[in-house]
Amino acid sequence: MPAPKQPKSSRTAAILLVILFVLAAYFAYIAFIRNTWSIPPEARLVKNPLALEPSVAAKQILPVYLDKCSECHGETGQGNGPQAKMYDPRPRMLTDAPHLATVTDGELFYVISEGHKPMPSYRKKLTEEQRWELVLLVRAFSHTVPPPAPGAQPSK
């Protein structure tokens, strides 16, 4: 005996469910990608060439930070600048010591240089030295030092 035909409304409902599932999966993927920074592994290994103390660099670069970064990250790096609420994801708190203690200077430099929506790239807007000074300013805000380079032997 041939299988009874499915009513047209059941097929239409099944197709709509599949389409809704695909759309939901797409939007979940986009939301995940927006919050994920893709930093190349070699960026972790880059060392800051500046021999300045973070507090000294902070004084030098603070005017640039206030001009370019504080609208989103806030004057003291709290992520509470006047434009912060406009963005999703919100700007990172540059005072988040537990997180920043796990991030190398090379990674910070990469993030500042390349940007990631909604944060713009500063590769062409700031000099290389200014971007490294901003790395030191982030260290001053968070009171952290960079973690040891991957594969480095801990000092005894």
Image: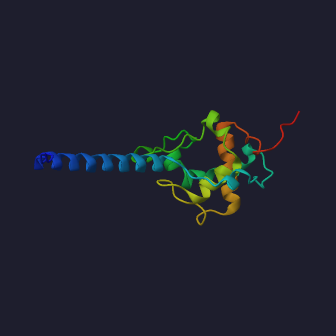
State the colouring used for the structure image. rainbow
Question: Residue reaching furthest bottom?
Answer: 124
Q: Quadrant of the N terminus?
A: top left
Q: Is residue 64 visible?
A: no
> In x, y percent, where is residue 113?
61, 59
Nearest to the observer: residue 39 or residue 90: 39
Q: Is residue 27 visible?
A: yes
The residue at the point 57 percent across, 50 percent down is: 66
Nearest to the observer: residue 141 or residue 59: 141
Left or right: 39 in relation to 57: left
Q: Is 125 located above or below residue 74 in the figure?
A: below
The residue at the point 52 percent across, 55 percent down is: 116
Q: Quadrant of the C terminus?
A: top right
Question: Residue reaching furthest front?
Answer: 1
Left or right: 62 in relation to 156: left
Q: How many marks?
A: 0
The residue at the point 49 percent across, 49 percent down is: 71
Q: Is 142 located above or below residue 47 in the figure?
A: above
The residue at the point 33 percent across, 46 percent down is: 24
Q: Is 118 located above or below residue 148 in the figure?
A: below
> In x, y percent, where is residue 133?
69, 53
Left or right: 124 in relation to 43: left
Left or right: 77 in relation to 57: left
> In x, y percent, where is residue 59?
69, 48
Q: Residue 28: which quarter of the image?
A: top left
> In x, y percent, where is residue 148?
77, 42
Q: Residue 84: which quarter of the image?
A: top left
